[in-house]
Image (cartoon, helix red, strand yellow):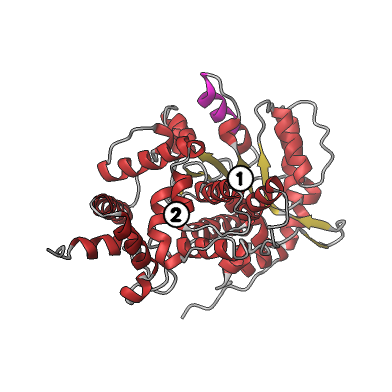
Amino acid sequence: MTQPRIATNPWEECILRCLNDPDLSERLRIRPEALPDLRAMPDDTAVLLVRGRLQQIYVPSRQKTAAVRRMLGVCHAHCLTHYANVDQYEHLARSGELTLSIDPITWMLTSEAGLGKTETAAAMRRALGDPHEFAVGHLPRQRSHIVIVLKIKSSATKEAILNALARAIGYPPDYRSGGAKEVRHIQRQLYLAGVMLIIIDELQFLTLSAAAHAQLARTLHYLRQLGIPVMFVGNFSLGHRLKKRPQEDRQRFLLKPAVLLPDAEDDPGYGEVLEEFVRVMGGVLDIVPNRDASMFHWYTGGNLRLSEMLVELSYGTMRACGRAAQTITMNDIAAAYNHRDFREMRADVEICRRQLITGKMEREDLWCPFELDAEQLAHRTELARSAREAHVRYAALMASTTAEEKKGVELAMQSMPALAPGLQTAKAKPSPRKSMVSFAGMMASKPKPA
């Protein structure tokens, strides 16, 4: 068995503490407090509290934890190369003779909108903890940042980017130009601050002009001059833009992108998200995750932001109808899915589902520009097809029953765990067929009484 590496300097010690932590995902998790009793609060206040609290939840799925581990691995490699020991650091800090990489690794973290890319970038900072101070030789005490996260505004210029970098490490942001001299100066400050990874968030909003992809490429080339690895965060639409760039840009920016996909309905992480929704809502959300996961996934496609919006819309509609003392059920979730305020989001969910089943792109912003793992894609496609078939069977079943029979169906679905004891929680034993899927198939196979 390979022994864990022992850190040789304070920077590596910080990185290895995260890389060697078997419970890294727990470092990343955010579990906000449950909401207080909302019944006595004004409707608008209660709805906004629900929105804010749901947005605070962060469940580190396997995909997101893997993305953070990759960031840590890049930081570790940069550390071993340029921060080999404190003597090297002190010499370079005094001499200013930096020889950082002329071709630093640059990669993209991408997904469709609403899957938590920004939150995953923030989780990387959370894993490392706050910047810590240490003394090296006769140098003044330094603060080690390791990772900095920047948001590039639409008006970003070279000097604006340098000033954003300066602010991130607590250095005076007084750059008035962005020439080679200024780049060398900020490069030294970043080295002193122990920055080993620059994360650029919201890069897709850099510009909306027709030449957007050209300006994006120029910005990334400018950042690469610093000799520090760069991870940039963007939606699928940004990936499609960059694929239109010349070969040299595609090779530098689009090698091994990290793609986040919506959690599949049988993914343990998806069940954990629904469990957190129930817990945080403090009894207001009356669903059973292992029973209702399939239906909830049908309405949202596993998109986290849409899931939050659907619960918020359900609760807001319920309050508007004078039902402040009642709880949200799956009937309320279904009504919210078909609500006019959810129309655009519903269209997105249905397009994503069709694209997955047919393998044909309908909308560029909802289609991953990069090749996906074949086995993973096949599994997700099979789940989508099974869910669609079950939904069709269920709709046909409900259309052929009387109002009294519908009530019996709903009561039977509520007792699905008893009818199908093999269906365990998503965390313990994930199953792609829960609730509607299992019940519709079971009922469709039963002959109707004469």
Is the C-beta separation of discs 2 and 1 under 8 Å?
Answer: no
Q: Characterize the magenta stretch by its predominant secondary structure.
A: helix
Disc 2 designates what residue? 331
Taking the magenta stretch, the answer to whether it contains residue 358 is: no
The part of the chain drawn in magenta is 210-219
Q: Which sits in the foreground, 156 or 294?
A: 294
Relative to residue 195, is residue 297 drawn left or right? Answer: left
Relative to residue 233, is residue 134 drawn left or right? Answer: right
Taking the magenta stretch, the answer to whether it contains residue 216 is: yes
Residue displayed at 58% across by 49% down: 312
Compared with 57, 3 (above or below) is below
- Quarter of the image where one finds residue 8: bottom right
> Picture coordinates of residue 232 (x, y %)?
56, 42
What whole-number distance in Å separates the C-alpha atoms at marks 2 and 1?
16 Å
| Whether residue 94 is visible | yes
Please name the amino acid that badge 1 sits on. Answer: Ala
| Whether residue 84 is visible | no
Crowding near the residue tagged with mark 1, few <14, some 14–19, many ≥20 C-alpha atoms within 10 Å: few
Disc 1 designates what residue? 320
- The secondary element bearing badge 1 is classed as helix
- Quarter of the image where one finds residue 376: bottom left
Q: Which sits in the foreground, 424 or 102?
A: 424
